[in-house]
Image (tube, rainbow, N blue to C red):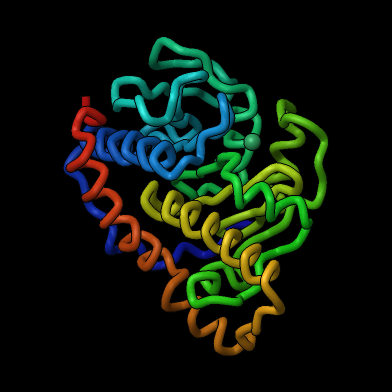
Amino acid sequence: MTALLPDLSFLPNFDSIEEERLHRKQRLAASFRLFGKFGFDEGVAGHITVRDPEHLDRFWVNPFGMNFKHIRVSDLICVDHTGTVVEGNALVNGAAFAIHSQVHAARPDVIAAAHSHSLHGKAWSSLGRKLDPITQDACAFFEDHGLFDDFTGVVLDLDEGKRIGASLADNKAVILRNHGLLTVGHSVDAAVWSFITMERSCQAQLLAEAAGTPVIIPDEMARKTYKQVGSPIACYYSFQPLWDMITREQPDLFE
Ligand SMILES: [Zn+2]
């Protein structure tokens, strides 16, 4: 079910596994600061994960119960495929393990996954519909997101995580009905950018449908625009201004 790997030659190269691991952890810590800044936190809900570059069945994730706005590189924890915390001194959120372990297992091409209970994402998710290509930005998700058309309470069961992975299929995102959004990428940068822009696309469609009947971009034009704004390289580069901003504003995230 894995998609053919797109051209990822634009991603940075590393001389060692340690260097690559640190890079991924820094991007992850910065992403939590961005989620905090955008108000994507809701109590202890929400998680972003990045696969370890050496142990491919392990991922790095936020410590349970810590505010996104406070997370530093040294706070991140590493979890193995059994849910055991193998690095760091904190618990892992049960839902983070149930969902992300299965998404990472189903999609070996994916490096990172992001999920939170952001306001417009969860409001849109209650409609049980996919996003329509009503704006240039929303075309990033045209024919590239799934819908998990079910809700069975807090996801703590690995089988439920597997079903979410199946609904994600080869796409970059999935709407979890009555719950929120989940995005993936071949870099932390792309997964997190996709989450941010998907949340805003949900907001845009909610606003547009509250005001009237939005004009839908025709399929052929949406497909063309998708290649311009929805590709791995476009998602990666769209993240860079946010990285520049958050690292200049909050350099303690590197600690
Ligand atoms: Zn959730």
Total labels: the figure holds: 0
Q: Nearer the viewer, residue 76 or 39?
A: 39
- Residue 161's image quarter? top right
Screen quadrant of the C terminus: top left
Screen quadrant of the N terminus: bottom right
Name above or below for residue 147 compared with residue 151: below
- Residue 229's image quarter? bottom left
> Which residue is at the far front?
211
Name above or below for residue 221 compared with residue 236: below
Spot occupied by residue 12 in the image (x, y as percentages of width and height): 23, 53
Spot occupied by residue 170 in the image (x, y as percentages of width and height): 61, 60
Spot occupied by residue 28 in the image (x, y as percentages of width and height): 36, 37
Q: Nearer the viewer, residue 93 or 53?
A: 93
State the residue at coordinates (46%, 44%).
112
State the residue at coordinates (54%, 58%).
198
State the residue at coordinates (26%, 39%).
23
Q: Nearer the viewer, residue 5 or 91?
A: 91
Spot occupied by residue 2 in the image (x, y as percentages of width and height): 59, 57
State the residue at coordinates (71%, 79%).
213
Query: For this view, does 169 lie left or right of residue 42?
Result: right
Q: Quadrant of ligand 1?
A: top right
- Residue 89's image quarter? top left
